[in-house]
Image: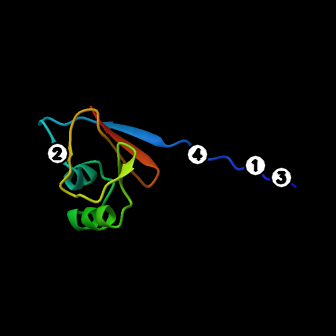
Amino acid sequence: MKIKVKVKEKETKKISISTEFIRLDAFLKMCDAVQSGGHAKIVIQEGEVKVNGEICTQRGKKMRVGDKAEFERKIYEII
């Protein structure tokens, strides 16, 4: 017996910033991906966040236009 599983496509949100860069923890907070800065710190340190396809544990990572952060099957792209 074969079972087919449909994997939901990841949702992408485009977020505009008005500065040269934004820290990863602040970016997740700005996108409403996390509830607070403390929550952002925890999920980043636990390795639950990917930046440009790679797991990132640096909460101070500088995010610039074109960068993408992925958390809980959602992609947040800076435009």
* Mark 4 to mark 3 CA distance (whole Å): 19 Å
Q: Residue at x 31, y 59 (%)?
A: 34
Q: Which mark is residue 19?
A: none
- Tell me if label 1 and label 3 are in contact, CB under 8 Å: yes
Give, as a three-letter code, the residue at label 3.
Lys
> Which residue reaches farthest right?
1
Q: How many marks?
A: 4
Q: Residue at x 21, y 62 (%)?
A: 37
Q: Which mark is residue 22?
A: 2
Q: Which mark is residue 8?
A: 4
Task: Describe the element under mark 1 as helix, strand or loop.
Answer: loop
**Residue 14 x/y as whole percent:** 33, 35
Residue with the mark numbered 3: 2
* Mark 2 to mark 1 CA distance (whole Å): 41 Å
Dot in front, 4 or 3 = 3
**Residue 20 x/y as whole percent:** 12, 36
Of callouts 4 and 3, the N-terminal one: 3
Residue with the mark numbered 1: 4
Give, as a three-letter code, the residue at label 1.
Lys
